């Protein structure tokens, strides 16, 4: 749970460096239901932006960390997935 929360927090902070229109588009794109679907979609979108613009040379390392994130989030209990999703949705209100 901690690893997933740390990754999510890091990416939430990173999107603050994007322009306002892009952030709003990301928020609108992840307006879907499910305990882990919005979080997974958000991770994919943000990682895609940063690999495309900033991290081409680091993409292998980033993909490895995303794979770890996917592994851990699949192992979370339903309650933990709900907690992580609620944390994510509440955090988006402040970005």
Image (tube, rainbow, N blue to C red):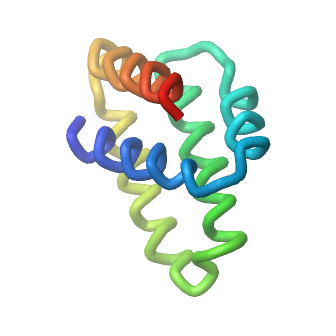
Picture quadrant where residue 52 is located: bottom right
Residue that appears at 37% across and 43% down: 9
The residue lying furthest to the left in this view is 2
The quadrant in which the N terminus is found is: top left
In the depicted structure, whether residue 27 falls above or below residue 53: above
Q: Quadrant of residue 30?
A: top right
Q: How many marks?
A: 0
In this image, 32 relative to 11: left or right? right
Q: Give the farthest residue toward the bottom.
A: 57
Residue 93 % position (x, y): 52, 23
- Position of 31 with respect to 34 (left or right) is right
Question: Taking 11 as reference, is 29 left or right?
Answer: right
Query: What residue sits 52% from the left and 28% below the top?
Result: 92
> Where does the image place residue 71, in percent across and percent down from the top left?
37, 46
Q: Residue at x 58, y 57 (%)?
A: 17
- Residue nearest the viewer, comparing 45 with 16: 16
Quadrant hosting residue 4: top left
Q: Position of residue 40 (x, y in %)?
A: 54, 37
Residue 93 sits above or below residue 13 on the image: above
Residue plotted at (78% across, 42% down): 21
């Amino acid at each position: 749970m901690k690893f997933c929360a740390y990754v999510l927090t890091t990416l939430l902070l990173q999107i603050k460096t994007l322009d306002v229109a892009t952030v709003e588009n990301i928020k609108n794109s992840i307006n879907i239901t499910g305990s882990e679907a919005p979080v997974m979609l958000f991770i994919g979108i943000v990682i895609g932006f940063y690999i495309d613009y900033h991290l081409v040379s680091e993409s292998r390392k980033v993909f490895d960390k995303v794979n770890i994130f996917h592994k851990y989030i699949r192992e979370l209990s339903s309650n933990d997935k709900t907690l992580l999703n609620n944390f994510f949705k509440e955090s988006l209100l402040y970005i």
